[in-house]
Image (spheres, rainbow, N blue to C red):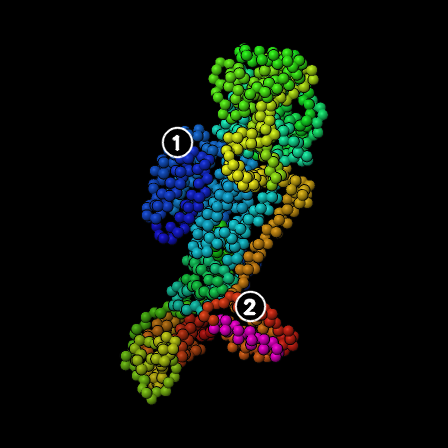
Amino acid sequence: MSQDNILRCWPVLAALGVTTVPLLLQLPVWIPLLVLVMLGLRGWMLWAGRALPARWLLLCVLTAAVLVLWLTTKTLVGREGGVALLSLLLGFKAFESASRRDWQVLLALGFFLAGMPLLFDQSPLAAAWLALSLLALTWAMVLLAGAAPKGSLRTAISALLLALPMMLVLFVVMPRLPGPLWSMPHDQKRASTGMSDEMEPGSISQLIQNQEPAFSVVFDGAIPPRPSLYWRMMIFDDFDGRRWQNIRGVTQERMGLSGGDAVNYTLTLRPEKSRLPALEYVEGPSESTRMEPGGVLRLEKEGEELFRYRARSRPQAAYLTDLSLQDQQFYRRLPVGNPQTRLLAERLRLQGGDDAGFVRAALEYFRLGAYRYTLSPPLLDGDEPIDQFLFSTRQGFCEHYASAMAVLARAAGLPARVVVGYQGGEYNPVGRFWQVRSSDAHAWVEVWLPSRQQWLRVDPTAAVAPSRVSEEVTQAIPALAGGGAAGAASANWWRPVRQGWQALSFSWQQWVVGYDASRQQGLYQRLGLGDSVDSAAVTKGVLIGGALACLPLLLLWRRQKGLPPLAEGRARIVGQLARHGIAVRDSDGPLDIINKSRRLPEQEFKQLKRLFKRYSALRYGAAKPDSAQERAWLKEARRFSVTGKHLARGSPPRT
Amino acid sequence: MLPFRKRLSGWFIARLPRESTCTLNQRRIYLLPTRFGLSLIVVALAVWVGALNYAVSLAYALAFWIAALLLVAVLMAYRQLAGLTLSGARSEPVFAGDAASCRIRLSHEQALERRLCLQRADGEGDIVDCALAPAASLDVGIPQVLAWRGAHPYPDLRVWSEAPFGLIRAFAYVRLDGALLAYPMPLADRDRNDHQEGREPSAAPRPTERDEFSHLSEYQQGDTPRQIAWTVLARRDVLVSKRFAGEPAGAGLRVIAWQDYPAGVDVESRLSRLCWRVLQCERSGQSYCLLLPGARIDPRPFQKEAALSALAAYDGGQPA
């Protein structure tokens, strides 16, 4: 193929390549790799001038590839399958593109492809790559339309920048619908970063090292003290001797809160299995959430989209409920085994006296019992894991302590359950929000006190390692904080950077990724566009915003209309002269113009002569254009005007 | 072109006046998305629907960015035509049956480069592609076959541009009031040329020093070096010959007359033969005089053009 074809079509292939790259992280790697190889091969064919392969051959290869795709992902629809299929089809389309129209179709598909990675990732980085893809595609479009390579990048950039304000206005103003048009099958494969469905010592230890943000919280007013930030997420009510899980043994539980001040807050997260964390103890469900027995919040509908909800909790309240005898029985169930633990429970029960006394005695036992908080405890591989932990290894983290405490309480005849969630969080002073990470995951125990009819929160981990609750995990565990002074120093400079980045991603989450119908309505009210997002408000927004967004366009228009300074100044002077009946032809030089203007009033004529003397010097005298001087001259030329009205009425134009 | 589009463009054109110069502005420029532009609109819609369904906020941004880009493309396509001035330039006359080049001058004063296409409005003939530098002017020729002699009006033109993205086509119809002149198609008439004048063209008298200078005319084969106006050649780089007053004197003058043919010969073949004979004389440097009913073209500067134009414009005794 000709040189020109290479110049026009290579950019299209390159732009598609750039667009495909982020899919490497999201799809099975061979699919985007295959697409990239195909694009490269097509580019080589253009360069080598090879003919396109026969259509039946393409069809065969395509069928094979789609078959492999179907065998590996088991689906061709939905998010992953659909995106993979589309990118494969795009790669094959490149082998079918010969005419300019084909390439244009390919490019249009590229714009669609650019949106695909967003289904998986909406981080600021993904947005940056989207902008890069758009630039590449637009540049390819300019070149494909036949522009000269020089200046084509500029055209693409300026067009995108001019479109940017309009995009922002549409982004903010165009109404968002509260729900989807049709529901899509969710991919089950998605890596689960959060909580597991059961608790077996060791399963949370992997989480603690994971610094990934779990959710973020903004408090409306006063922030409760850090030690009382227990984010309740789920409860485990059944113990089989080794592992805790939730078998929903109690389906109804009336919850009453007494005392404590209420706090309002907004929580943002990507729910997993529709679990929502809430500060203990939440008063009731808000919109599109429901309350499950055990005081945990759940999302009404399944969904993995970013979700934001407001809640109202009373952290200092007492959780009152009256358990039926049957329920009490359920919460006391304990498999046989762990004899030493049972003995210890008896002893503590006697030591403490009543039920509250037992809890106190148990916590005291943990505090003084030479237990050590560690993230890498020895394995509990014996037949009696609780005995092994309490009496021989004595090392563990929240899971171990919570599990042991719950078993102790049950052995002592008190209803008890394990609560799993998060504890604490990190306050971000830049973004003024609380960031809770996977590493803040925590497990604690609730013991039901018959005397008070209350579920009492008991956190044995806090008794062993008080700093785990009052500070962050990284501080509580020396190994995580980094050893020695060097580690501390590096943490010092690193912290503001990290917090800045977090604040950025928080606002990103809040205002870009999480910009939904409710947020839009709030913004409409704040901007004074209207109380709700109705057609009148949207029209108003589009009109006002559109007008603002067009300002850069106007500026561009005015700027590009301008001629070089000398030409513009000459045109201005000629225009002035024409208004007063002196016609100047394009071919007239400075001397001709001066000659024609002899009938101007004295002063103006002198000015004109001066102007054109400098014009000649600048235009013809200078070896090299002096733009500063030229602009100065233009400024002067703009001031030239013929004021005398008598001239206009005087002699008719001489042409 | 589809019949519907033909009718539509016919309607556009019928509304336009003929004008010698036309500067395109918002009243003349039409903007429509190209097929590529339409497909990108579809893509933007698809991305938007996807954003809606998956609640992907950034996909909204992508959809709106594409939409905004289309709007910017509309403006940029409009700018490709806005402020462009078209006027008829001097078009060389041709002989009937030949393709004339209908010269159009494109000019503008804006500081942007334009990429333009021109074609006859009826969609026939080649598309002329051109690039216009900032604040410059350019002459382009639209090929047009002139089937018969006489003055032909300039064809109705369509000028368009899809630059810079190929998404939006800006187009305008233009009717310029210039004329293309077609001389009669020459028809060999060797007998009459030879039997009237017994002399060979090569025997034409050579000018002498004493002859009085009359005018300059285009160099023709056979002109002696002494006839060539060397000063003009040096100054303007064109080859012209001096003609002298004494040259066509007396017997040298050949008369080419309408009356040379019997009454039965029809007008067009008469004119074609006369045309051939004029050309023959011009080629051989023979001086001649063309006699038409109501007109007489004697030797004079640009006699060839005058004679051929008279033949082209002949309309039954009342030459224009």
Q: Of the numbered discs in the image, which one, if any, rests on residue A632?
A: 2
Q: In the structure shown, which secondary structural element does the residue marked by tag 1 occupy?
A: helix
Judge from the rendering whether residue A229 lies leftward or rightward of residue A630; answer left or right: right
Q: Specify the subunit that label 2 lies on.
A: A
The answer to whether marks 2 and 1 sit on the same chain is yes
Q: Nearer the viewer, residue A641 or B145?
A: A641
Residue at numbered disc 1: A68
Picture quarter containing residue A258? top right
Q: Nearer the viewer, residue A620 or B246?
A: A620
- The alpha-carbon separation of the residues under discs 2 and 1 comes to 70 Å
The amino acid on which the numbered mark 1 sits, given as a three-letter code, is Val
The picture places residue B65, in percent across and down from the top left corner, at: 54, 46
**B14, above or below A271, in the image:** below
Magenta highlight range: A601-621
Kindly report the secondary structure that dominates the magenta region of the rendered protein. Answer: helix
Residue A183 x %, y %: 55, 31
**Residue at (42% x, 73% y) in the render:** B309
